[in-house]
Image: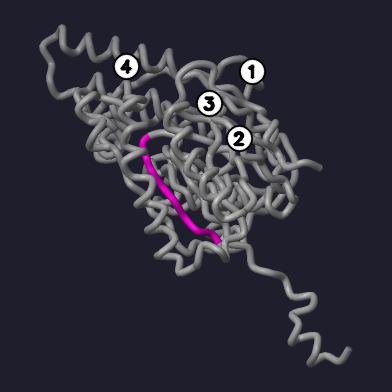
Amino acid sequence: MNLESAVEMNIDEPQDCYILAVETSCDETSAAVIKNGNVVLSNVIASQIETHKAFGGVVPEVASRKHVESITLILEEAIQQAGIPPEKLSAIAVTEGPGLVGALLVGIMAAKSLAFALDKPLIGTHHIAGHIYANQLTNEILYPCMALVVSGGHTELVLMEKEGSFKLIGRTRDDAVGEAYDKVARALGFPYPGGPYVDKLACESEEVETLPRAWLEPGSYDFSFSGLKSAVLNTVNQHRMRGENEFHPAIARGFQESVIEVLVEKAVRAIGETSAVQLLLCGGVAANRGLRAALSERCQKEEIPLLIPPLVYCTDNAAMIGAAAYLKWKNGEFSDLALKAEPSLSLEEWSVAT
């Protein structure tokens, strides 16, 4: 066969992979189409923040109902924006966990229906793997690497010795960092979600209230923020008992500096004590300006390559789910239509098979 004939038959030419991804683990309804694991053709997100503000936090039943109302339109818009006909899709990916069980089920049922109707493979995807591989949407991930996961429900250090392999070396023992931010924000009188308010106030404050750091046992990579949260509450009460009113900025800065110092120090130490050659910041709290700045400065000083995703890929979105699902696609690991929601799905167990 001559070269011209081979080109005409597309022999040895890689075929593009188009994954339609669905994310409904908490209070964002999102769908995206991702090409070859790192090209975002569409990423549609419907947030429920305004709905949950009235309750001071996410109400699971309300979140599930909002997903039901939005999911069909979000899927249609994602496919339309991508310009890819449904029959050209390679697979349907969906977050199977962790998350709110009712919210997860909405996305899973929609994804299973599409996979069945289009006769496409189904890929159940881990939510935290998505946050980690959000970095792949804008940068090349080098291995072995270390991921610092900071979100509303997770604070973890994850060693990735190779693509799709996850090993937890540290995790929170109580409140996740995002939970701590929301609880401190509530104590300071800020509405939900409170993290951005605390971050803004902390970055602008010239005064700082000294608060404790929870280092735990020597050498530990674990985290704990419940004691810091309690210290903030006690400090707020002391100020109020003395009739003081202008204490909010100093406490916000003190709290944020305590959180950031522990996160940065443990992440940098983990890089130094393992074979990791790159640090990845992942999760909703990766949008925190103070953390992004402090980690960037420290990594530059230590000459550690650092990846931080753009703000749009920090919070929950379907593009990150498509990026993580591509790992399973390349390895031929698909889910069947019996896929169910797994609110406590293990990241290590979800790792790509070796």
Residue 52 image-quadrant placement: top left
Mark pair 3, 4: CA separation: 30 Å
Q: Measured from the top left, where is residue 167 in percent x and y?
A: 70, 33
Q: What residue type is labelled 3?
A: Pro
Q: Tell me the SS state at disc 1.
A: loop
Q: Measured from the top left, where is residue 13 in percent x and y?
A: 74, 75
Badge 2 is on which residue?
339
Q: Does the magenta stretch include residue 33?
A: yes
Task: State the residue at coordinates (42%, 32%).
Answer: 103
Q: Which amino acid does label 2 sit on?
A: Leu
Mark pair 1, 2: CA separation: 41 Å
Colouring chosen for the image of the structure: one colour
Q: Residue 218 carries which label?
A: 1
Q: What residue type is labelled 1?
A: Pro
Q: Tell me the SS state at disc 3.
A: loop
**Pointers 2 and 4 in contact (CB under 8 A)?**
no
Magenta region: 27-34
Residue 49 image-quadrant placement: top left
Say left or right for 281 vs 207: right
Q: Which of marks 1 and 2 is nearer the N terminus?
A: 1
Badge 4 is on which residue?
232
In this view of the protein, can residue 222 be seen by the observer?
Answer: yes
The C terminus is located in which quarter?
top right
